[in-house]
Image (cartoon, rainbow, N blue to C red):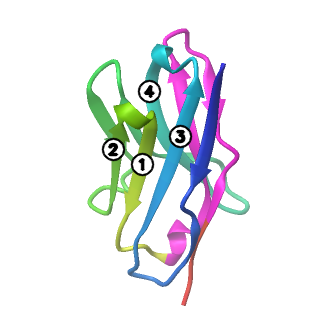
Amino acid sequence: QVHLVESGGGLVQPGGSLRLSCAASGSIFSLSAMGWYRQAPGKQRELVAEDIISGGSTNYADSAKGRFTISRDNAKNTVYLQMNSLKPEDTAVYYCHVRTLLANNYWGQGTQVTVSS
């Protein structure tokens, strides 16, 4: 079992920045990937960025490339999403996601990001 606690969402003006954090606890030794998804009203949940721990690579949605950066602090069992040059279309609930080596998926509770002037 893996427990995820997110923080860092909020209201920001277009062009601004936010950093999301997700602290993992529990069976963290078995993680194969950590990442962030988002879901805007009326839309499906979509991948934003993912850190493939087992493969040593990262994946980004096209909309996130060049603006968002995913990083991980192994000592704190925390994954971050640095979001720069935010746009109104980035407004969504952002969810932390982890996948274990046994292909189990766990989700955080979600944190609201609103980009508006």
- 20 relative position to 94: left or right: left
* C-alpha distance separating marks 4 and 3: 14 Å
Q: CA distance from mark 2 to mark 1?
A: 5 Å
The amino acid type, in three-letter code, at marker 2 is Ser
**Which residue is at a point 65% across and 36% down the rendered structure image?**
107
Please report whichever mark, 2 or 1, sits nearer to the chain's N-terminal start: 2
Give the farthest residue toward the front.
75
Q: Are marks 2 and 1 in contact (CB under 8 Å)?
A: yes
Give percent across and percent down for residue 113: 58, 67
Disc 2 secondary structure class:
strand
- The Cα atoms of the two marked residues, 2 and 4, are separated by 12 Å
Whichever of callouts 2 and 4 sits on the residue coming sooner in the sequence is 4
What number is the disc on residue 80?
1
Q: Which residues are magenta?
A: 88-112
Q: Which mark is residue 33?
A: 4
Q: Of label 4 and label 1, which has the lower sequence position?
A: 4
Q: Earlier in the sequence, mark 3 or mark 1?
A: 3
Of the pair 83 and 63, the residue shown nearer to us: 83
Amino acid type, mark 4: Ala
From the image, tell me which residue sits under label 2: 71
